[in-house]
C-alpha cells in the first residue's frame, strides 16, 4: 500500500494568498500541514518551489504606499474596480458570488473583506464605503463571519503593526517598493 502524502502549505502569516489556499482546503475538507515561512530569509523548500526567480514577488500596494496625486489615482482605480464588483453582486442577488455557498470567486476576492480595511487604516484612506457599496459590504460581512473563514484569519492588530512597518520601509527608501 502506497504511503499517502500530506498536503503542505508553505506560507507567511499575513499573506492573503496563503489564506486563500487554506480556506479552499478547509472548505473541501482536505487535511494539510501549515509551515510558516520567513519570506525575507527563504527556506530551501520555498526556493525549490520557485527555482527560476528564487524570490516571492508581492503586489505593490499603490494606494497604501503612495502619496498625493498618485495615491488619489490609485484609490480612484480601486473604487472603479469595486463598482464593477458591486454591480455583479447586485445582479446575482445571491449570498455569495456563485450562489448560496462560498465558492471559488469568493475565495479569490475574499481578502477584500479583511485585508482592505487594514490597508485603509494603515494608509489613512477610505476606499470601501458601505453606502456606496452595499452589496459588497453585505457580502464581506457574510464571508468574514463564515466559521471556516473567521477561524482562519491572522490577528488584525498584528496585521496593522506589520503593514505600518512595511509601509514605512517602502515609502522611506527611494524606490523601496520595487525591492519588496
Image (spheres, rainbow, N blue to C red):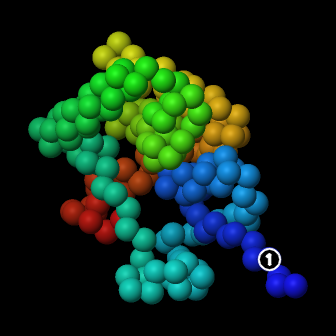
- In the image, 180 versus 29, the foreground residue is 29
Assign the N terminus to one quadrant of the image: bottom right
Q: In which quarter of the image is residue 36?
A: bottom right
- Vertical position of residue 12 compared to residue 161: above or below: below
Q: Quadrant of residue 125?
A: top left
| Residue 167 x/y as whole percent | 37, 50
Q: Name which residue lies at 73% across and 63% down.
A: 32
Q: Name which residue lies at 50% across and 46% down.
A: 104
Q: What element carries label 1?
A: loop
Residue placed furthest toward the top = 131
| Residue 131 x/y as whole percent | 35, 13
Q: As drawn, is 121 to the left or to the right of 5?
A: left
Assign the C terminus to one quadrant of the image: bottom left
Q: How many labels does the image show?
A: 1
Specify whether residue 118 is in view: no
Q: As drawn, is 99 to the left or to the right of 64?
A: right
Q: Name which residue lies at 75% across and 77% down.
A: 5
- Vertical position of residue 81 compared to residue 152: above or below: above
Q: Quadrant of residue 51?
A: bottom left
Pointer 1 residue:
4
- In the image, 37 versus 161, the foreground residue is 37
- In the image, 55 versus 164, the foreground residue is 55
- In the image, 45 versus 38, the foreground residue is 45
Disc 1 packing (10 Å; few <14; some 14–19; many ≥20): few
| Residue 70 x/y as whole percent | 15, 43
| Residue 86 x/y as whole percent | 33, 26
Specify whether residue 58 is in view: yes
Amino acid at each position: 500500500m502506497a504511503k499517502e502524502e500530506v498536503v503542505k502549505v508553505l506560507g507567511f502569516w499575513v499573506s492573503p494568498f496563503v489564506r486563500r489556499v487554506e480556506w479552499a482546503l478547509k472548505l473541501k475538507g482536505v487535511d494539510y500541514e501549515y509551515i510558516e515561512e520567513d519570506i525575507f530569509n527563504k527556506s530551501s523548500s520555498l526556493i525549490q518551489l520557485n527555482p527560476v526567480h528564487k524570490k516571492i514577488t508581492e503586489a505593490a500596494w499603490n494606494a497604501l504606499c503612495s502619496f498625493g496625486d498618485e495615491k488619489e489615482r490609485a484609490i480612484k482605480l480601486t473604487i472603479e474596480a469595486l463598482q464593477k464588483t458591486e454591480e455583479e453582486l447586485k445582479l446575482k442577488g445571491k449570498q455569495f458570488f456563485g450562489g448560496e455557498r462560498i465558492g471559488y470567486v469568493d475565495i479569490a476576492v475574499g481578502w477584500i473583506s479583511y485585508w482592505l480595511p487594514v490597508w485603509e487604516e494603515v494608509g489613512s484612506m477610505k476606499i470601501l464605503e458601505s453606502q456606496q457599496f452595499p452589496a459588497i459590504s453585505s457580502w464581506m460581512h457574510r464571508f468574514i463571519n463564515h466559521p471556516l473563514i473567521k477561524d482562519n484569519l491572522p490577528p488584525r492588530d498584528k496585521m496593522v503593526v506589520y503593514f505600518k512597518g512595511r509601509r514605512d520601509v517602502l515609502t522611506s527608501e527611494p524606490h523601496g517598493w520595487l525591492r519588496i
